[in-house]
Every structure is written in C-alpha cells, then in structure tokens.
Image (spheres, helix red, strand yellow):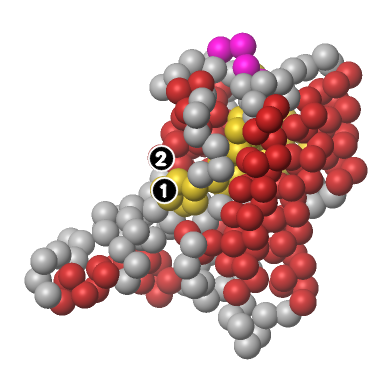
Amino acid sequence: MASHEGRTYVVTGAASGIGAATAAALAEAGARVIAADLARDAAPPDAHDLERVSLDVSDAASWTSVAERLTGAGTALDGLVNAAGITRRARLGDATADDFAAAFAVNATGPALGIQALAPLMPTGSSIVNVGSAAGAMAHYGVAYGASKWALRGITKTAAMELAPRGIRVNLVSPGFIETPMTASAPDAFRAVNLASTPLGRTGTPEEVAAVIVHLLSTDAAYVTGTEIAVDGGLTGHGGGLPIARAMGSAHPPE
C-alpha cells in the first residue's frame, strides 16, 4: 500500500461499511482522516485517530461548514471520498417521487455538492473518489437507487474533465454485493441471485473496496482520472454470459 503520510482526506459515510473501511485504511497508511457522517455518534470505537464530524451530504450548508472548518484550520485537503449512500428498493411500478428525490439527494447530488465545496481547497495532485455501484452499470430492480448511481457516473466524468486542468483527479469505484449494514437488509433472494451471478462466487468485503479507493487516491494512480473500476467479483463483467457458459459446461457454479 502506498504511503499517505502527511496527507489529509475527507471520507463521507465513514460511520460504517465502505466509508468506515476506507477511513481506517487511510489512517493506517499515515493520513489524517476527517470522517464525516450524518450518524457520526453511531460510529463504533476504533483504534484510529479519526476526526469525526457531522455531515448531511444532501445539504449544501453542511458541506460549507466542513469547508469552513478546514479553511479556518489552514488545512490543505488532498482528497475526498464520497462513500455516503442510501438504498431504495421499490420497483418501477411502485417507486414514488420521494424515492427518487431521496436517492438522488444522497447518492448523486451529495457527491456533486461535496466536490463543489471542497475541490477549491485542493492543490495539484489531489484526488477524488466517488463510490458508485454495480447498479449504475446495468439494469437494477430498485429503479431510483439504480438511476442515482447511473447519474453519479456522469457527475464523476464531468468533474474529472473540469478539474483536470488543476491537476485534480476524479474516479469512480463501483462495488458489487459487499457485506455492509446496507446489504444486510437485502432480501434473501437478492443475496442468492447476486451470488449466483458473481463469477468469483462470493460476496466482497468493505476492506477490498477500500483498498482500491486508497490506491486511486495515491500518487501510484497519478495518471488515472475519469475512469470507473468495478470491485464486484466479475458481476458486471460477463454481461449475462455466465449462465450461458455454465449451461454449456465451460464454467461451474460456486460451491
């Protein structure tokens, strides 16, 4: 793992799941981590020296408060990880306007507001990573959630284009089925079909996603921007070919 000694990052959704794993991994690599979450006080105790702040990613004023805190402390910010997210599982026939508004507010508008607020504090060489989803790369039964993650892909690419002249990189990491508090509430059938559709035949861990994020933030990825990296065990890679391959006998289902 590349060293992040002396660097400072803001990580949203840092109280649990992928955000928490990323904050811990960055701290282990020597970074100063500002762990932001709406549920800041719900974060479990950890061994890392994290600075915890309350943040509603859907609220521009909340982002401004974080920016002012950093500016007031004279902090140069080296990167941002937009890991906060919510799910909405209603299907097309049942999804409401509120489902769409909530999903987009946190999963798409939130990262955009964060980039607006914090990119001005970043010097050349900084990096932003947005956490998307396999649902943003294929059809997804939860239409509002899937649509919000598709939107985040566009936000990522536009931000990468606009911030490149300043030497700031922006990339997207798209997890598949990862064992987090969010996926713990998924129906058993959803879990079973995801496992059956994942070539590696298992779920992923937050730490496996965090490792890719930490790499993208590092100078080892200095020429990588505007890209999307799937951390999904091959879920989106086969494009529906996995059941065909299994039926033809060239692949085997997971144990």
Q: Of 168 and 229, which appears nearest the observer?
A: 168
Note whether residue 149 is visible.
yes
Q: Amino acid at mark 2?
A: Glu
Residue at 54 percent across and 17 percent down: it is 4
x and y percentages locating residue 204 in the rendered image? 38, 49
Q: Of 234 and 219, which appears nearest the observer?
A: 219
Note whether residue 29 is visible.
no
x and y percentages locating residue 132 in the rendered image? 56, 52
Residue at 20 percent across and 62 percent down: it is 254
Image check: 22 left or right of 96? left
Reading the image, the residue beneath label 1 is 231
Reading the image, the residue beneath label 2 is 208
- Quadrant of the image occupied by residue 83: top right
Q: Amino acid at mark 1?
A: Val
**The residue stretch that appears in magenta:** 5-9
- Determine whether the residue tagged by mark 1 lies in a helix, strand or loop: strand
Image check: 236 left or right of 226? left
- Disc 2, disc 1: CB below 8 Å? yes
Please tell me whether the stretch drawn in magenta is mainly helix, strand or loop: loop
Q: Of 103 and 190, which appears nearest the observer?
A: 103
Q: Residues within 10 Å of mark 2 (few under 14, many from 20)?
A: some
Question: Which of the two marks, 2 or 1, is nearer to us in this view?
Answer: 1
Q: Earlier in the sequence, mark 2 or mark 1?
A: 2
